[in-house]
Image (cartoon, rainbow, N blue to C red):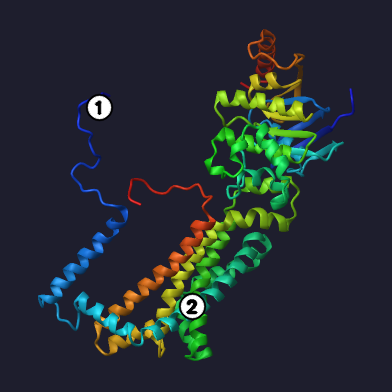
Amino acid sequence: MSEALLDIKVHRKDFGATQVLQNVQVRLHPGEIVSLLGPSGCGKSTLLRIVAGLEHDYSGELQHTSEQVAFVFQEPRLMPWLSVERNVGFHDDKAFDAAWVAQLLTEVGLSGFAQALPKALSGGMAQRVAIARGLYSHPRVLLLDEPFSAVDAFTRMKLQDLLLDLAHRHHIALLMVTHDIDEALYLSDRVLIMGNRPSSVRQELIVDLQHPRDRRDPQLAALKAQSLTELHDAQVF
Amino acid sequence: MAVPSKPLAGAEPQRKGGLRPRWPAHLKGWLVPVVIVALLEITARSGLLPPYQMPAPSDVALTLFDLAHGALAKHVLASLLRVLLGFAIGASLALVFAAWVGLSREAEAYLEPTFAGLRAIPSLAWVPLLLLWLGIDETSKIVLIAIGAFFPVYVNGVAAIRDVDRRLVEVGQMYGFSRRRLIWRILLPASMPGLFTGLRSGLSMAWMFVVAAELIAATKGLGYLLSDGRETSRPDIVLAAIIVLAVLGKLSDGLLAGLERRWLHWRDTFSGQGNGA
C-alpha cells in the first residue's frame, strides 16, 4: 500500500489525573476512510484533536506527509456574522476564491444560499456549510468529529452519502470519530474499535465492501454483530 | 387529559384576546403617557395642585416653546458637546483597556483588581477632587463624564471578550491563525454585541453625569437650566429641561441602537413573545 498520509502514535495522554489514551496507533492511507468507534469519553475526539493540532500536551509522535489537513467539528461552528460563502472561504477572509466556494456550495447542495446568514440555516444545512469549509483548503485528509451526531436520522443518512461522494470526488482520506456503529460500518474501509479509558485500539474491523453500499446488506449486519460483541467485551455497555 | 376540540366549519373565527381592542404596536406605547398628561392637566387646571409646584402640562409646553426661541439652543449645545467629548474619551479608553484585560490574563492579573477597586467608588465622589484639581471650568466636567462612561463600557467589554464561544476560536486555531488574526477575524466580531451593550449604557451614564456636573457648577447647559429653574421657583423650566434631556437621551441612544441593528443583524436572538413590538 502507498505511503501513509498520517501516522499517529500516542503513547499517553492525560487530562489531570485521568489517563485517556494509552498506546494508540492509527495510520491513514490516501483515499482511505477510517472510523474511530467507541463510547463517549474514551478519548477518540481527543485523538482527533491531537491530529488537528488543537491538543499539544501529550506524549507520542505525529507524522503528516501532507500539511493539508482540515477538520469538521461536531457542531457546524460557523461564524454567525458572516454569510455562508464567507464562512466557506473563511480562511482567506474577503479574498476568498469565489469560484471554488461556489463550486463547493453546489456540491453540498446549497448553491442558492451563498448570501444567507447562518441563522437562516437548519442544522443539516449548517453542517453542509461546515463540510464545504473543510474542503475549501483542498485537504488531502479530512478529520471529522462526530459530524452528524446532532442531526436527525434521515438527514444523517443523506449527509453520509454526500460525504462519501465528496471524499471520492476530491480523493480525500477521511478519519472520522463516531459512536454510531452503523455509520462507521457504512462509511469506512476500516473501523477501529476503542474501549473505555485509558483506551487504545482494541480491534480493527476491515469492511471489505464496494461503494456504493446498501445499508441493508447482511454483511454489514454481520459486522455490526461483531463490533457489538467487541464493544460488549470491552464493557462499554 | 381531555382536550376540547376546535369548533369546525360554520363557527365564527375567534379572535385571540376576545373583547380587548387591538392597537397597533406604536400606539400602545402612547397610552400611558397620554393618560398621565391628561390627568395632570385636569388636576393643575382645577387648582388641586398649586402652579408653583406642578404647572399644567400646557404651561410647560409654552415654556418649552419660549425657551426654544431663546436660550435653549445654547444650553443644549453646551450639554451635548460635553457628553460627546466625555463619552468619546471615556469610552475609547474603556475599549482599549477592555481589549487589553479581556485578551490577556497577564493584563487581567495586573489591572483588573485596580479597576474593580476604582469601580467600587461611586463616581460622584470624584466631584470634590476634580473641582480641587481642575477647577470649575470645562475640564472637570468632561473628566467626570468620562469617568462615568468608562466603567460600563469597560466591564461589558471585558465580559464580551471573555464570553466569546471557545469553539469559534478553535476554528481559527485550527487554521493556525496568528493571535492578531484571531482577534480581528473572530474575537472582535464575536464580542460586538457585548461591546454595544456597554457603549449604550456608557452613553446613558454620560447623560447622567453631565446633569450632575452642570448642577454643581455651570453657567450654561441643561443641568444649569434645571438648577436655574429651582432657584427661581419655576417648575415649568425644570420640567421643560427634563423633557429636553429625555429627548436627547433617547435620540442619542437611538443612534447607537440603529448602528447595533445595522451591524448586528446577524444575531439569532429571542425578540420577545406576543405581537407587541
Chain letter of mark 1 equals B
Q: Measuring from the top left, give residue A85's x and y in whole percent.
A: 64, 44
How many callouts does the rendering have? Answer: 2
At numbered mark 2, what does the secondary structure look like: helix, strand or loop? helix
Q: Which quadrant would residue A38 be assigned to in this image?
A: top right
Q: Measuring from the top left, give residue A141's x and y in whole percent.
A: 78, 34
At numbered mark 1, what does the secondary structure look like: helix, strand or loop? loop
The answer to whether residue A213 is above or below residue B150 is above
- Name the one closer to the observer, A27 or A43: A27
- Name the one closer to the observer, A42 or B230: B230
- Name the one closer to the observer, A92 or B49: A92
The answer to whether residue A78 is above or below residue B247 is above
| Kind of residue at disc 1 | Lys
Q: In which quarter of the image is the N terminus of chain B?
A: top left
| Kind of residue at disc 2 | Ile
Chain letter of mark 2 equals B
The answer to whether residue A28 is above or below residue B88 is above
Q: Measuring from the top left, give residue B19's x and y in whole percent.
A: 18, 44
Q: How crowded is mark 1: few (under 14 residues within 10 Å), some or many (20 or more)?
A: few
For marks 2 and 1, give the CA distance: 60 Å
Q: Can residue B8 be seen?
A: yes
Q: Name the residue under label 2.
A: B145
Most distant residue in the top direction: A218
Point 65% across, 32% down: residue: A108
The answer to whether residue B180 is above or below residue A130 is below
Labelled pair 2, 1 in contact (Cβ < 8 Å): no
Q: Residue B6 carries which label?
A: 1
